[in-house]
Amino acid sequence: MNTFKINQLIGVAIFLFSVFVAVPYAIAASGRWDFYYTLTSVALLSIASAGVWLTFYIGRINIGQGAFALIGGYVSAILVTKAGLSFWLTLPLAGLFCAFIAVLIGLPILRLRGVYFAMVTLVLTEVSRLTMLALPITNGAKGIVSIPLPGALSIFGLTLIPDFSMLKNDKLAFYYVACVLMVICFAGMYRLVNSRFGHLCRSLQQNEELASSIGVNIAYLRIVVFAISSFLGGIGGAMFVAISQSIYPSSFQVSDSINFMLNCFLGGLGYVFGPMLGTLTLYFGWSLLFELGKYQLLIYSSLLIFLMLVLPNGLLSIRFSKMKGVQK
Amino acid sequence: MNPLLQVKNVTKKFGGLTANRDVSFDVEEKEILSVIGPNGAGKSTLFKMITSFLSTTSGEVFFKGEKISNLSPHLVARKGVVRTFQETTIFKSMTTHENVIVAQHLRAKATLAGYFFGTKAAREDVKKFSGTADEILEFLGLDDIRDEIASNLPQGHLRALGIAIGLATNPTILLLDEPFAGMNHDETMHTVGLVRKVRDSGVTVLLVEHDMSAVMAISDRIVVLNFGEKIAEGTPKEIQNNEKVIEAYLGSEDITIGI
């Protein structure tokens, strides 16, 4: 048990070191600055995927995270451009707004199970895209463009984050912010899943009737989980908008929603860090196959099908089955 | 004194089909009351209405004088009326011990946020849950299989685990839905012993059952349903000699109900 804990600590230390020191150093050495954008995207997409993963954890297939990423992006963009708020304030607001929407939508649709819930969430993504096209405040298909970069964040005169437009290398700054958010998100998720909250989620996933017979308010728990999930989607979307400095109704579409779900599948539904690994693999896998031109999609999807057949419990199951072997 | 649980004129209709018609009976404190009846007599429906898994079409259920029908199941559980399930319904991918820990939800003092941040109350809860789970498992003789994944357990143990989950909620009255179904004689007698033990620890037991020998051996009183209506109520002996009951079961005398 103790060696397991030490191993875990070492693992976390190596992870943090590679994310915050090794990767920036390697990029500086190789001069591949474009990798910053890729890795920042991976970090943000994995936050949104983590939300999807949590809804999987209560036994619901969520193909609607794109909707919440889009809503979060628009909330941040509108607040920054129209109300002149600091981006750092709009980031949590975007998340909270998404959580609020999730509660409203979740109340009726979380009663559905299995494929029915999945269908409704899928539709949700399309509905949000059409809504953003139609609303006057979102500026229709032209979207909201030239959003200013995030300003400085200071508390009591102490500057925590410098003004991004003053920085020489805002790519590196965005990379750090995204990674910090990702670390916070997954640390929180790990804690959540391993606390009693996570146990109750598992009880819900396995048998909702039994869960309610032992006194669990299943409706309440489902809503809380869906709200947390959407909060993460909103945060991810808002950060994306800050980086690209623009948002359109097509910024997050059905295909993004499906990718969020695939990230979870690929990484492993049983492991908290599954969505992170899944996002990294999927994102880089797609880019690496770019060389193949028109066969990219064909080979990519064949590989996915193959992976799911061979590893139905996700990539992380390789590591865990090995570890079990050692323990025996 | 008021009875612990009162079922008053409960009727349930599914469209044109009447599953229960005007059923009334009382459950006294610390007794074992069995509800029996041929297949389709509406026993399970009645159970579901008592625990609010189904709403009643008309009529009410009172627990300690308080109405508990047509609420949410988790609210009824919170009041102390807890059911187990007909099928072997447990949390399959958890160990026996984890099953009982999760089931102690109603004993929790800390909030969910408290568990997340690891407050003092939450840490105490976690420690206490583990201890109580061990006690319950030992009480039901399940301590040998504490760390087995529940889906690997044999039938008899699954039923016992179902009862353990029920007990973990600290119920006043435990409703067992066919606890002896699909068991051989030895397993049945073992489970009969467990149910007695549960009653002796101060929990009132209401059960629905097919297995006549077990019912006759275990019950203080029996309620008989046929086609959704109550046709008899009394001690096992009275029931065995009740002509309506005999007729309902077989149309004539037979050994399966012990006559």
Image (cartoon, coloured by chain):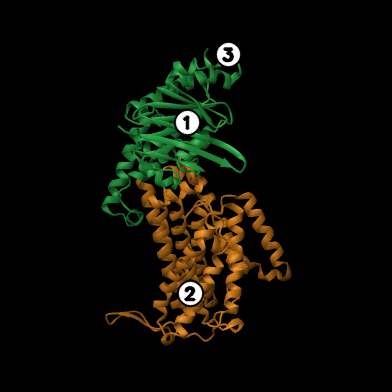
Chain colours: A orange, B green
Three-letter amino acid code at the position of disc 3: Asp
Spot occupied by residue A306 in the image (x, y as percentages of width and height): 66, 54
Number of other residues with Cα within 10 Å of mark 2, as a class: few under 14, some 14 to 19, many 20 or more: many
Left or right? Give the position of A301 relative to A321. right
Looking at the image, which is closer to me, B123 or A315?
Answer: B123
Q: Amino acid at mark 2?
A: Ala
Give the residue number, with chain letter if any, for mark 2.
Answer: A238
The quarter of the picture where residue B173 lies is top left
Judge whether B72 appears above or below A65 on screen.
Answer: above
Q: Amino acid at mark 1?
A: Arg
Label 2 in the same subunit as label 3: no
Residue at point 58%, 28% (across, down) = B39
The reply to whether discs 1 and 3 touch (Cβ–Cβ < 8 Å) is no
The residue under label 3 is B254
Mark 2, chain letter?
A: A
Give yes or no for contact between labels 2 and 3 (Cβ–Cβ under 8 Å).
no
B196 to A284, vertically: above or below: above
Q: Residue at x 52, y 37 (%)?
A: B45
Query: From the viewer's perspective, is B166 left or right of A314?
Result: left
What's the distance in space between the residues labelled 2 and 3, CA to CA?
75 Å
Cα separation, mark 1 vs mark 3, equals 29 Å
Q: Secondary structure at mark 2?
A: helix
Determine if residue A203 is in view: yes
**Residue positioned 70% across, 62% down in the render:** A299
**Crowd class of label 1 (few under 14; some 14 to 19; many from 20; radius 10 Å):** many
Q: CA distance from mark 2 to mark 1?
A: 50 Å
